[in-house]
Image: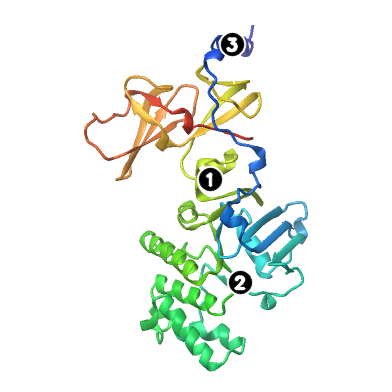
Amino acid sequence: MSKVSVSVEIFIKHLIFLKNLLNSMRQVMQVKWPQASEKNILKEKESTSLATKPICLTINGLSFSYPEQTNARVLDDVSLKIYENEFFTLLGPSGCGKTTLLRLIAGFQQQTAGEILLGNHSLNDKPPFQRPINTVFQNYALFPHMTVAQNVAFGLEMKKFSAETIKETVSHMLSLTQLENEAHRYPKELSGGQQQRVALARALASRPKLLLLDEPLSALDLKLRKEMQRELKHLQHETGTTFLFVTHNQDEALSMSDRIGVMINGKIQQIGTPEEIYNSPFNRCVAEFIGDINFLEGVSEQNSIILAGGQLLPVQPVNDGFVTLAFRPEHAKLNRQSGLLSGYLKEIAYFGTSTLYYVDCEGQPLIQVRSQNITDECTPFAIGEKVHVQIPQHAFRVLAS
């Protein structure tokens, strides 16, 4: 008999044993754990406050592909609604179609199919200059030969506002963005954060119905980026302008947004509040992209799941068959006595406020456990030490394929 046949036979015997064990324990293990519903993938959980707000932007069935690559869609049947005065973030990896969607909304490119509505008015046939939409680009696109005040005034002058209105608006925007003392300086004389504020002041001066922001913070260092995150949110709140912010940075999305749309491979995978996206990811793609996370593979049957290591979990899965469970590292704890999983400590990464442990559990990928560094009472764990991983029932999510 070949080695493959022997391995298959052993695997089948293990499954039969575990199935019998499952049947004997089923009556005492009836806990229902959270699970994903396929209805949640694009069904927005609209709170009462959102449901009563007017809709600013509606995108229906938007698709885009380049003429020479008609079989490869950059955007594939994208639909979403953004409400007035909302800070909405489009989050996804590089190359997923985020910037392309912004360009279609702004009118810089034409969609292959679908409709774009601003309020109740279609934008499909309107050129960029007829759309009450402004864009803040990653490189800011400031005019180097103009002062800060002249940059901010530029859009107003192009729209033939009166000199008095321009002066008042520029003064107000410079005050709002804390640039009053920089009015007569040129872009090359400003820091990155100041240039960012000039670009924002210029974009908001003409009071657009929608402001598009294409990864505007990516060129800033970490400390300045965090400062600008707070300023952006404050500016959006003060002006009441609807923001559509594009980024690949999950921290930016989670800290600033009213809602987030996760885009992967040209499709919106999930829309929800930061809490919903982080705590209840719909599928593995979303879960992997938002924060650190662990996955456990298993086989489900009725009200339980059998993990690859033989552990039995009282979970009500989506469907019988192979399933994926997910849990966040901060929801697990290490100890030396007992736990759902056990293994050997493989790596330790220190982050100041927390420590991330990597545990090699037989039959599973490396398990991450994050511990806050708030006490020195316990004896530190050491690489190579045998440890146990405790995971509370509420921490698990059963993910859709």
Amino acid at the residue labelled 1: Glu
Question: Which quadrant: the N terminus?
Answer: top right
Q: Which residue is mark 2?
A: 209
Q: Which residue is mark 1?
A: 276
Question: Which quadrant: the C terminus?
Answer: top right
Q: CA distance from mark 1 to mark 2?
A: 27 Å
Would residue 143 be found to the left or right of residue 117 on screen?
Answer: left
Amino acid at the residue labelled 3: Asn
Q: Secondary structure at mark 1?
A: helix
Q: CA distance from mark 3 to mark 2?
A: 60 Å
Q: Nearer the viewer, residue 121 or 344?
A: 121
Q: Secondary structure at mark 2?
A: loop
Q: Nearer the viewer, residue 20 or 349?
A: 20
Is 338 rendered above or below residue 88? above
Q: Are marks 3 and 1 in contact (CB under 8 Å)?
A: no
**Residue 351 shows in this picture:** yes
Q: Residues within 10 Å of mark 2 (few under 14, many from 20)?
A: many
Q: Which residue is mark 3?
A: 23
* Residue 19, horizontal then vertical, whole percent: 59, 12
* Residue 130, horizontal then vertical, whole percent: 69, 77
Q: Secondary structure at mark 3?
A: helix
For the point 46% across and 21% down, which residue is it? 362
